[in-house]
Image: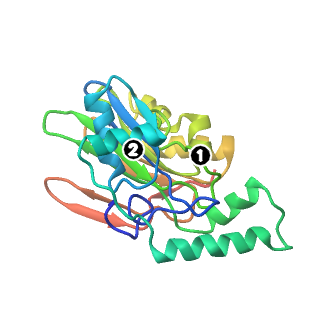
Amino acid sequence: MEDNPIFNAGTGSTLNLLGEIETDAAIMDGRTLRGGGVALLRNIRNPIKAARIVMERTEHVLIAGIAAERLALESGLDKGNLRVLRRVQAWKGGLKQLKSKQMKRSSSKALEIFLGRQSDTVGALALDAEGNLAAADSTGGVTLKLPGRIGDSPILGSGLYADNQSGAATATGIGEQAMRLVICKTACDLMRQETGPSAATDTIRLATKKVGIGLGILTLDRRGRFAAAHNTRHLCWAARTSLTSAEKMWGTRVSK
């Protein structure tokens, strides 16, 4: 997905307020609870590979900025030009909106612009034949974000979580909301007693009550039952099992 310019991850990432790309990504192993994340990468083609390097080759969980880029390059990862025309056009359009007389300069207005554009995180969950769970995500972040802003995606518990004893989850939407609720850990804790679909719905219902609209979540429980739930207009997802595959533009929409 990072190589597909349609997604807000890797090539095709959104631009921050200064017109720069800063990507975040993370990965987590549900068997060992080890995880790795990277943040504020500028020109690494596949940030998720850099996150895996952090998990497998260091004792750390999150590395950001120049140090993360150096680690990625020294580990053999490729640089890449992540800019695409439609993201540049969206950035220019967003700046015009921010500067217009009808809108005051504020972070809340930037979020309003973000909510009107399709620029979500991409995430993936997996369950193998031995019952091991894993989660991963990657993003360019919120359109017109302040330089240096780090969202939920590289943070275990917020943007993603995986635990063989409960389940796996990954989130999309407004990262600040996901971090305040530690939303993926919340969903995984619910899966100790609930199914994946039930945990997804209950988590988004809680999110709507606590922080309002702006989030979506994918869940996968220990028995392979998966779900997508959201309080936004759309949430695109796809699933594949040993027997079948499916894809949709929406999951369970939870309004309250």
Q: Is residue 76 above or below residue 12?
A: above
**Residue 106 placement, left or right of 9:** right
Q: Is residue 91 above or below residue 52?
A: below
Q: What residue lies at 44% left-to-right and 72% top-to-bottom?
A: 84
Q: What residue lies at 40% left-to-right and 50% top-to-bottom?
A: 138
Residue 129 position in % (x across, y down): 13, 38
Residue 156 position in % (x across, y down): 44, 33
Answer yes or no: is residue 26 visible: no
Q: What's under tag 1, amino acid-wise?
A: Gly
Residue mark closest to the camera, 1 vs 2: 2
Residue 15 position in % (x across, y down): 55, 62
**Under tag 1, what secondary structure?**
loop
Residue where numbered disc 2 is placed = 69
Q: Is residue 42 above or below residue 93?
A: above
Q: What residue lies at 67% left-to-right and 66% top-to-bottom?
A: 113
Q: Residues within 10 Å of mark 2 (few under 14, many from 20)?
A: many
Q: What's under tag 2, amino acid-wise?
A: Glu
The foreground one among 70 and 177 is 70
**Residue 42 placement, left or right of 101:** left
Answer yes or no: is residue 62 visible: yes
> What colouring method underlies this structural image?
rainbow
**Under tag 2, what secondary structure?**
helix
The foreground one among 78 and 56 is 78
Residue 73 position in % (x across, y down): 30, 45
Q: Are marks 1 and 2 in contact (CB under 8 Å)?
A: no
State which quarter of the image contains the N terminus: bottom left
Q: What residue lies at 63% left-to-right and 74% top-to-bottom?
A: 92
Among the two numbered marks 1 and 2 on one chain, the one whose residue lies closer to the N terminus: 2
The answer for how far apart the CA atoms under marks 1 and 2 are is: 14 Å
Residue where numbered disc 1 is placed = 148
